Image (cartoon, rainbow, N blue to C red):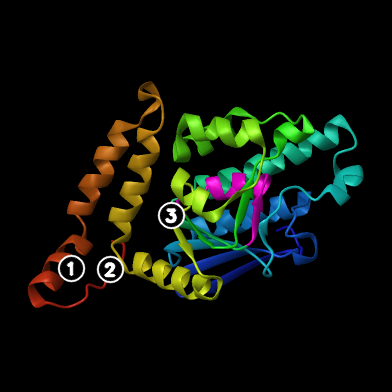
Amino acid sequence: MTTTDKMIARRDGAIGTLTFNNPARHNAVSLEMWQACAEIMNDFSADPAIRVVIITGAGEKAFVSGADISKFAEERASNNGADTYNKAVEAGYASVYNCPKPTIAMIRGYCVGGGMGLASCCDIRICTENSRFAVPAAKLSVGYGYPGVKRLLDIVGPSFTKEIFYTARQFDAEEARTMGFANRVLPDDQLETYVRDYAATIAGNAPLTIGSIKFIVGEIVKDESARDMAKCHAMVDKCFASSDYEEGRKAFMEKRKPVFTGK
C-alpha cells in the first residue's frame, strides 16, 4: 500500500469516503497520490460492506485542481518519469470509473483539469454554488487522450465537450448543471449533509439492482460490438433469484423498510 497523508480513506457503515488531502495546493495531485487513489478505490471495490463511495477534496477551496506542478521536476522530467506518471493517473481514473459501487463526487471550489477528469469518472456529481470548472489543456498545448475525452463526452455530449476544450475557460456551477455535468448545485453549508444523506439513501437500496444498473449503463455507452450482453442478462436474472428480491416483496406487503444483504 502506498503510504501518504495526502490521501485519506474513511469507512462510515456502508459509505466509503476518499479525500484528496492537499489543501495547501488546492488538492493538486502528485504521483504517490494517484497511486494511493487506485489502491484505496480497489480496496473499496472489493469490500462487500461498502455500498457507495464519496470522493472529495479537503478544505474549502478545491475538489481537485489537477497535477501538482511543484512535483514535475521530480516526477515528470524524463520520458520514463512522464510515462510512469501518466499510467498512474489513468490507473487512478480507471479505479474510480470501474468501481462496481455507485460513486459520488462531492465538489466544493475548483474542479479543474485532472479534477474534472476525476469527477467525470464518477456516477454522480454534486457541487456548491461557488464551484468552478475548467479543462485548460488548450492554454498549455497539452494533449488530452481518448479515454478522458470520451468520459466527459458521455456526460455532456459532443458540443459541450468541444466548447469546454476549445475555450479552456472556467465555467460556473449553473453552467455545469446546464451542461449536465453537475447533477445538483447546493449552498455551501448544505453540501456535506446532502451528499451523505444521498449516499445513505443509495446504500439502503438493493445492491444487486444498483450493481446491475451500473454495469448495464456502462455497457450501453460502449460500441455495440464490445457489449457483454450475456453478463447484462445474468445480472438481471441474479436480482430475481436473490433473497433480496423476496425481502423486497415482503417488505412492500408488510409496509416496512426492506433490509437488503446483497444475496
In the picture, the disc for residue 1 is: none
Foreground residue, 99 or 122? 122
Question: Which residues are drawn in magenta?
Answer: 109-124
CA neighbours of label 2 inside 10 A, class few (<14), some (14 to 19), many (20+):
some
Residue at point 57%, 48% (across, down): 95
In terms of secondary structure, where does tag 1 sit? helix
Image marks 2 and 1: residues in contact by CB distance under 8 Å: yes
Earlier along the polypeptide chain: callout 3 or callout 1?
3
User: Vertical placement of 225 versus 217: above or below?
Assistant: above
Q: Is 148 colored magenta in this rendering?
A: no
In terms of secondary structure, where does tag 2 sit? loop
In terms of secondary structure, where does tag 3 sit? loop
> Percent from the top left, x then y, of residue 38?
63, 51
The answer to whether 210 appears left or right of 185 in the picture is left
Earlier along the polypeptide chain: callout 2 or callout 3?
3
Earlier along the polypeptide chain: callout 2 or callout 1?
1
Q: Hey, what amino acid is under mark 3? A: Asn
Residue at point 54%, 34% (across, down): 161
- Give the labeled residue for mark 3: 183
Name the image quarter holding the N terminus: bottom right
Q: Nearer the viewer, mark 3 or mark 1?
A: 3
Q: Hey, what amino acid is under mark 1? A: Glu
Res. 99 in view: no
In the picture, the disc for residue 260 is: 2
Q: Nearer the viewer, mark 2 or mark 3?
A: 3
Foreground residue, 49 or 212? 212
Name the image quarter holding the C terminus: bottom left
Res. 188 in view: yes
